Image (cartoon, grey):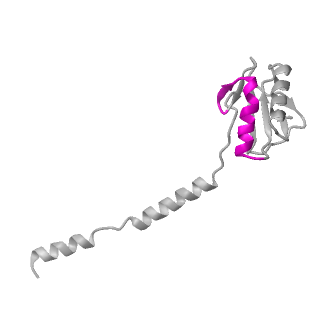
Amino acid sequence: MSDSEFLIDEEEESQIDLTPMLDVVFIMLIFFIVTSTFVKEAGVDVSRPNAETAVVAKSNAIQIGITANNQIFMDKRLVDKRAVRANVERGLAENPGAAVIIVADSDSKTETLIEVMDQARMAGAESVSVAAEGGQ
């Protein structure tokens, strides 16, 4: 056996097959993507009022935020109150039976809150509720 044949055999043996490791990594990636939940938030910070009877809501709810100066936010974007109905209809089409949760600032007008609730109900939402901080 010559020296050149010995070097070729040594190079072939030193290679590591990464295919099984990549398969495992891709399977884990797919597992985490499938099992993760995506929460859509209203996208605005508000000061919620306190309520002694507040309960934790489902995570697949459609959230609508109302700021202290009565601006309405859905999915981190400003929405006109006339467009709330169309956005809720779209959300219900994506997630049938989802509840609508209105996260209203304690300084927002009740009139804006009622108008948003009406738009959500006209869109076909069966459950419309207002978010509050839990009692102390």
Q: Residue furthest bottom?
A: 1
Whole-percent x, y for residue 26 in the image:
49, 59
| Residue drawn at x 35%, y 68% as measured from the top left | 17
Quadrant that contains the N terminus: bottom left
Horizontal side of residue 11 vs 58, given as left or right: left
Q: Over which residues does the magenta segment extend?
A: 75-96
Query: Is residue 54 part of the magenta span, yes or no?
Result: no
Image: 41 above or below 66: below
Residue 76 can be seen in this image:
yes
Q: Main secondary structure of the magenta part?
A: helix
Whole-percent x, y for residue 41 in the image:
69, 36
Please name whichever residue, 68 or 123, is drawn nearer the observer in this view of the structure: 123
Image: 68 above or below 99: above
Whole-percent x, y for residue 92 in the image:
75, 42
Please name whichever residue, 48 or 112, is drawn nearer the observer in this view of the structure: 112
Residue 130 can be seen in this image:
no
Quadrant that contains the C terminus: top right
Residue 69 position by quadrant = top right
Residue 21 position by quadrant = bottom left
Image: 42 above or below 7: above
| Residue drawn at x 16%, y 72% as measured from the top left | 7
Horizontal side of residue 41 vs 25, given as left or right: right
Please name whichever residue, 49 or 83, is drawn nearer the observer in this view of the structure: 83
Q: Residue furthest left?
A: 2
